[in-house]
Amino acid sequence: MKRFKNILVAFDGSPDSVQALEAAETLAKDQQSHLTVAYVHEATNETSVYPRRKQLRRMI
């Protein structure tokens, strides 16, 4: 199997992105790859990245 050096996964807190993050984490560990997580959110005055950033850190 070809080895991945870098893996990029987008994360927005949705159930699908949680599954993608888990799969990317497993693949990165298996391949001894660098995993980069791009947190994606809709920019509005009512949303903030900081509360979800804590959630993401707990998951990694």
Image (tube, rainbow, N blue to C red):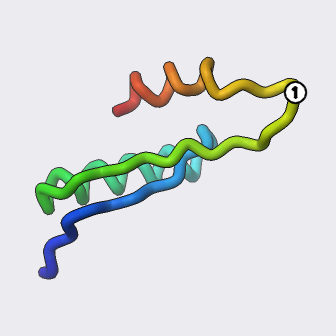
> x, y percentage for residue 11?
54, 46
Residue at the spot 29% in from the left edge and 49% down from the top edge: 25
Residue lying furthest right in this view? 45
Asked if residue 54 lies left or right of residue 7, the reply is right
Image quadrant in which you'd find residue 52: top right
Is residue 12 positioned above or below 6 on the image? Answer: above
Residue 48 vs residue 29, the one in the foreground? 48
Quadrant placement of the C terminus: top left
Asked if residue 23 lies left or right of residue 48, the reply is left
Residue at the spot 62% in from the left edge and 46% down from the top edge: 40
Is residue 20 positioned above or below 45 on the image? Answer: below
Asked if residue 56 lies left or right of residue 34, the reply is right
Is residue 41 positioned above or below 49 on the image? Answer: below
Helix, strand or loop at disc 1?
A: loop
Residue 17 vs residue 35, the one in the foreground? 35
Count how many numbered circles sit on residues in the image. 1
Residue at the spot 32% in from the left edge and 61% down from the top edge: 7
Identify residue type, mark 1: Asn
> x, y percentage for residue 37?
43, 46
Residue at the spot 36% in from the left edge and 49% down from the top edge: 36
The residue under label 1 is 45
Is residue 47 positioned above or below 31 on the image? Answer: above
> x, y percentage for residue 1?
12, 81
Asked if residue 37 lies left or right of residue 60, the reply is right
- For the residue carrying disc 1, how many other residues have a C-alpha within 10 Å: few (<14), some (14-19), or many (20+)? few
> x, y percentage for residue 13?
60, 38
Image quadrant in which you'd find residue 12: top right
Image quadrant in which you'd find residue 44: top right
